[in-house]
Amino acid sequence: MRETDEVARLLQELKSRSGLSYGALAKRLHLSTSALHRYCNGDVMPTEFAPLDHFSRVCEATPQERVELYRLWVVVRATRGNRPTAAPEPVAPAPPATPVPPATPVPEAAPAPEPVPDRAPAVPSRRRTRRRGVLAAVTAIALLVAVGVVVTGLRLRPDGETDPARAADAGSSTGSPAPSLSPQLSAAAVAAAGASLPGATGGADPSTSAPISVAVHPSGWDAKCDQYVVNRPPSEVPRPPAVPEAAGWASQVGAVPGHSRSVKLTVQGTGWDTVLLTGLNVRVTRVAAPLAWNAYSMGEGCAGGVGARSYRIDLDAARPVPVVADGSGSLPVVVTQSEPAVIEVTAETTTHDVSWYLELEWTSGNRKGMLPVDLGHGTPFRTSAVKDRPLYAYPAGGQAWEQAPARQ
């Protein structure tokens, strides 16, 4: 099989580039030298991707090489399976054993019915093998569709049509994030219903227990740059908090992030399986007129940085989609229990009050799904425009909020 040869070639290339011997590599990977030889020669394909993933990390493979290795492994496992498991089939010369009873005397002809049941299961077993082959082929096609993202990068939904439902909904809350208000990854996707984010999607089942955990940091990486809208006069708003206390400060005064909301996600595997994050989506659950409250700035002269994987979202777009920030990396990316990934998202609006949440697409072996990401317990993120709102800043060394030039 061509993919098997490609896996062997890539492993041999990585080993050669690392300068390590088979013995040294085997010790680091906690494998036997003979097993490592079989992997590198293409004689055996591991049932889990973890050994190959560890191999690529020890040999310092590039992210592109690791993703390509995962793609090839998925194809080989889906179409061929592990070669040693196929070995018992040749041992099925059980039929030659059946002639032995005829060679015995006639009195022993009574046990002869026993070989007949032995042969009968052989037919269903072959049928089961064929069925498994068909299922494997179907699984391979489905996985190849998912892994196609590996080559094309982040999958984003089409952005061509105007959204009449969004234009008509100025101030009303939709009971569910209808497809007209939120982008779709594929034609088969169905929007999740309600703010509690239940529901199902075609091809990616959110009810599937995700082998990843996501830590959400609502204040993001540039809390000093944040603006908030608060339904209080300046005399009733405490001074700006230190960055670690920003979330508590916002909760105390009932503040809503203004103009933009920065969120940092730390994604980590929960078990031994390797997980590939393949896509990031945004779902809008409500669009209303911007809050007519005062705006408060947390700092002056700040500028947000660009993380390893940073995305920007225009919540005012007819179909908002995450766009990779200039100079940033993007999905797909592999995560494990020991190697998390950080994804930074900034969502902006200049004309609405928008409630929204994120979805992370993942795949692991023959499993895949979507994991909703919000503030917890189904509470979506929220961002309101600050255009034309009174803006207040707290000058360094000052004792009170002072009105500042309004920002867009």
Image (tube, rainbow, N blue to C red):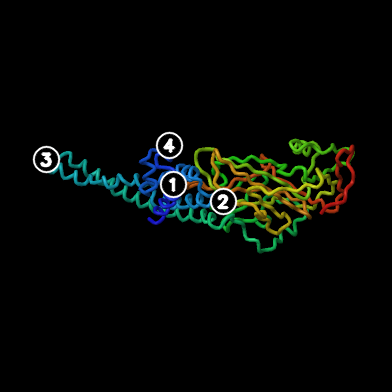
Crowdedness near tag 4: few (<14), some (14–19) or many (≥20) residues, C-alpha within 10 Å: few
Going from N to C along the chain, the mark reached first, 4 or 1, is 1
Distance Cα–Cα, label 3 vs label 2? 66 Å
Image quadrant for the N terminus?
A: bottom left
Looking at this rendering, what residue extends furthest in the front direction? 19
- Which SS class for mark 1? helix
Image quadrant for the C terminus?
A: bottom right
Q: Amino acid at mark 1?
A: Lys
Q: Amino acid at mark 4?
A: Lys
Instruction: Name the residue located 41 percent from the left edge and 42 percent from the top edge.
Output: 21
Q: Which mark is residue 15?
A: 1
Looking at this rendering, what residue extends furthest in the left direction? 105
Counting from the top left corner in percent of width and height, residue 243 is at: 75, 38
Q: Nearer the viewer, mark 4 or mark 3?
A: 4
How many numbered tags mark residues here? 4
Residue annotated with mark 3: 104
